[in-house]
Structure formats: structure tokens, C-alpha cells
Image (cartoon, rainbow, N blue to C red):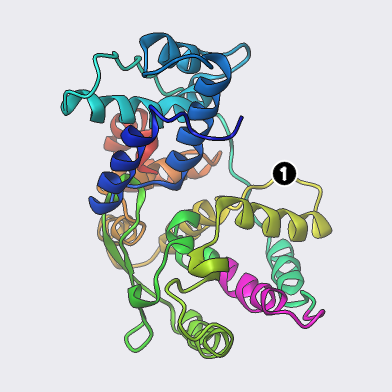
Amino acid sequence: MNKTPSYLTPLIEPFVRYREASGNWCESYEGGLARFARSCAASFPDASCLTQEMVENWCRRRYGESNNSCRARIYPIVTFIRYLRSRGQTCVQPPTLPRIEPQTYIPHAFTQKELTKFFAACDDLPSKPKHPWVLNRKLTVPVFFRLLYSSGIRTTEARLLRVADVDLVHGVLNIQKSKGHGQHYLALHETMLTLMRNYDNAIAKVFPQRSYFFPAPNDKFHRTQWVQHNFYSLWDKISSVHVVPYAFRHNYATANINAWVGEGFGFDEKLLILSKSMGHSLIKSTEYYYSLVPGLADILEEKTNAGFEEVIPEVRYEEI
């Protein structure tokens, strides 16, 4: 059963409108709420209202599920329950969110050869059959991934960029949909700005009234699956090493910090500028990227003195 139970519809729809109006809507909420609704319909077919049992049934940690996976799955429901309780619409108690587990993933360090091959594969995408969405992919993919690589922008931030957020005159991006809902500005490198201008001219001929800079069907933004599908379909052609699209952001941070070693301008000042351009509210979040790479942490510790050891363990996972 895919239909949302009738007793949940008048609760979910105002919640969605509220989150969208406040600028705090996240696309993961949509899927999480939909799956929760289907679970309620399937497990409690005779129910006429939201109950504690329904919430606990869905939010219970599953066999083999990590804390982080469980947290991501149930977070939309916890937020939904808190919304209802604050308005006196339910007595159901929200479950406790599992604690965030430290990530042990070591990001991939791109080689110049890998990058050259990957972007060559992006540029070699087919333009046939003659269909608007084939042309869209041909035009968008090379620019989208070069933007991730050259700016350190998060994949979500790139997907949600609106046309109005991109200043192609001065080369500045207005990042309104950032992690933690923070807003920041990002200056583009001149070469990236040229690519963005050329792309804008080309894509505007296909989708002249688009709302999003990188348009998807029905005047929407691309989903996470679009990023993953295009990245892996191209990366797997050039390498068997496991890499995620987010590695471009890590590469941007470490490449910048490495380039400062031995330069005259203050290391701390540059780290602050980099932190702001990446949308971090705290410098320690930028330092965290560097700490993940063996050997590089020693350089950063030397440049920032003993404070490095004190701030790295305290970094918030949501911030990076």
C-alpha cells in the first residue's frame, strides 16, 4: 500500500508547508515521511490515528543498522513528532536519536591522472539520441562536477542552486541551502566562471524558463541519485578504487592547505578564509578534513600550534 493513511495526511501536509516556508525543508524528509506512512498503513491497517506504537515500530533500531544509519532514517519522523507536540496535535513521544558515531572513512586522494581521465569522460558523454534530457546531461555533468572540484561546494548545495543564486557578472554564488541551513557566499575562479557562463548560455536555449541552475525534469532540482549515478558511471570507467562524489570537497580543502606551506601570507588567515568559503561556522570543521589524511595533520599542527589537538576531537559531524 503506497497511499498515505487518511489520518496522517492532515498532519503531514501542514508540516511540509511549514518546513518549506521556513527554509528548513530537506529532500530526505520527503522519502522518510513517505516510508513511515507506508509502514503505518501496512503494519496498522485498522488504525485511525497516530500512535506511540507506530512511531516506536518504525524508529526501533534494526538488526545490523549503525547508529548513523538509524539516525538518518528516523530523524524526519522525530522532527515531525516534535512539530506535532509543539502544537498540541499529538501526545506521542519522539524517540531518542542515536548518538553520532565517528566516521572512519579515509577520503580518496585524487591523482592528477585520475582527475584528467574523469573529466575527459565527463566531456565525452553522448549527445544522441536527440532528446532534451540527453543534451541536458551532456551539458550539465562536465560543469557540475568541475564546480564540485574547483570550489569545494557540497553536492547538495550545487544541486539546489537556483538561477537567481548565481551571479555570472561578478562570479559569486549565493549558497542559501547549506548544511545546518546556514547561508554563505562563494567566489568562483575565473576559469570556472567562464565555464558557468558558457553553460548558462547553452542550457538557457534548451530550458529558457528554468528555476534551478542545473535543471531537472518538471523544473525541479536533481536528486542525490542523479549525482551518484553520473559520478559512478564515469568513475568506474577509469578506476576500480572506491570513491564518493563528496571526495571532491575534501580534495579542495587539502589541496588549498597544502599550497600554503612556505608562503608568506599568514596560515591562520588563509584557513579562516577557506573555512568561510566552505560554509563552516567554525575553523575546526575545516581542520577536520585535513586531519583525516595520514601525514598531513602534522603540518597543520605545526602551523596552528597545539590548538589543533584540542579542537579536532570535538568537531561536529553535521558541520563538515
Label 1 sits on a secondary structure element that is loop
Indicate left or right for 146 with 27 as reference.
right
On the image, which quarter does residue 211 sit in? bottom left
Quarter the C terminus occupies: top left
| Closer-to-camera residue (96/100) | 96
Majority SS type along the magenta span: helix
Q: Residue 97: image x %, image y %?
A: 37, 19
Q: Residue 220: image x %, image y %?
A: 49, 64
Amino acid at dot 1: His
Q: Residues within 10 Å of mark 1 (few under 14, many from 20)?
A: few
Residue at position x 54%, y 28% in the image: 38
Residue 235 lies, with reference to residue 85, above or below; the image says: below
Q: Which residues are magenta?
A: 127-146
Q: Inspect this view and state whether residue 298 appears.
A: no
Q: Which residue is mark 1?
A: 242
Residue 43 lies, with reference to residue 108, above or below; the image says: above
